Image (cartoon, rainbow, N blue to C red):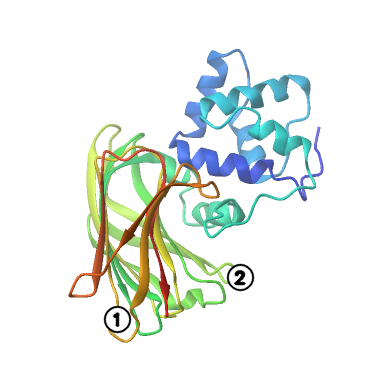
Amino acid sequence: MVADVGANRFPGELRVALHASGLTLEAIQRRLADRGFSIGRSTLSYWQNGRRLPTEAKSLLAVAALEDILKVPAGRFTEALHNPGSQPARSDLDMAASAARIDALMEGVGCPDGLSTMEQINTVAIAEYGPGGGLRIVRNLDTFRALVDTDRYPLIHGGEPGGDPALIRHEAISGGRIGRVRRDAEANLVVSEFIFDRVIRRGDFHFFHSFSYDDNDQESLLLYALLTAPRTMMILDLGFHPDRLPVRIEEFERAVDNGPDLLVRERTLSPDRRVTFVRERTRRGVAGLRWEYA
């Protein structure tokens, strides 16, 4: 049965949970099968893309099982299905709103399984902000473990609303090269295909080094990482332009993007106008820095 999905928030809730879990659709399909549910990969894909909704009794039972598999609060998916006219709570980190657009861009660069093919072990992001208060450059140094045999991974950059994605680009320094690039002008999103220098076998590690450039220089007020799985180390290092310094900085952590803050700590700039956020043995969720300009 195909249902009206125009205003339903179930697909967005499911996409966010899938990204946060780090599981592939095949892995979820197997876990559902272990619980007695025969749900095809294509059906799971339709559910997260909003092409169809689960409506039959057996499918609704599978949805309840998905809540447990993806470790979301019991009843979240069911409530989203049964309240089609309601909208997810908006926040400065509402990822559900752009998840479908990101999925489409990832498919366009040949990465239909998105972020679920690799597990991020360590990440270092060194960011530089311009005189307009906008994120101009991010240097990324990442170590991953392959969850399946793979030879590519999507690089994602989301600019500030109203910016021009034509002014955003990725550059590969080591570990591979940039392939296809897709842009979403309305959402100011860019996804680039990072093609590895070899096939990375399941269980093997791969290090790659890349840059993101954004010449829009639109004011930005936070930088965060979506932690889809625990990481050994995460470092965010931010440098601010002398003509635009923040007057207040906080580090924060959340279990989900639009949930409440679990931790907030005041931070100050160093003499060289930098602030560094470090976490060891991180848990799943969202963690980063936010600030205010005068």
**Looking at the rendering, which quadrant does residue 150 occupy?**
top left
Q: Nearer the viewer, residue 179 or 10?
A: 10
Q: Secondary structure at mark 1?
A: loop
* Nearer to us: label 1 or label 2: 1
Image-based side of 18 in relation to 119, left or right: right
Q: Residues within 10 Å of mark 1 (few under 14, many from 20)?
A: some
Q: Nearer the viewer, residue 257 or 5?
A: 257
Note whether 228 is above or below 55 in the view shown. below
Q: Position of residue 57 (x, y in %)?
A: 77, 20
Q: List the residue tagged with mark 1.
A: 241
Q: Nearer the viewer, residue 164 or 20?
A: 20
> Split into 4 quadrants, where in the image is the N terminus?
top right
Q: List the residue tagged with mark 2.
A: 186
Residue found at x 37% / y 69%? 248
Q: Nearer the viewer, residue 241 or 267?
A: 267
Label 1, label 2: how many angstroms apart (C-alpha)?
Answer: 28 Å
Query: Which mark is on residue 58?
Result: none
Residue found at x 30% / y 32%? 202
Q: Position of residue 223 (x, y in %)?
A: 39, 62
Image-based side of 243 in relation to 29, left or right: left
For the residue marked with disc 1, what is the amino acid? His
Q: Position of residue 123 (x, y in %)?
A: 27, 51
Q: Residues within 10 Å of mark 2 (few under 14, many from 20)?
A: few
For the residue marked with disc 2, what is the amino acid? Glu
Q: Position of residue 215 (x, y in %)?
A: 40, 80
Residue found at x 63% / y 17%? 37
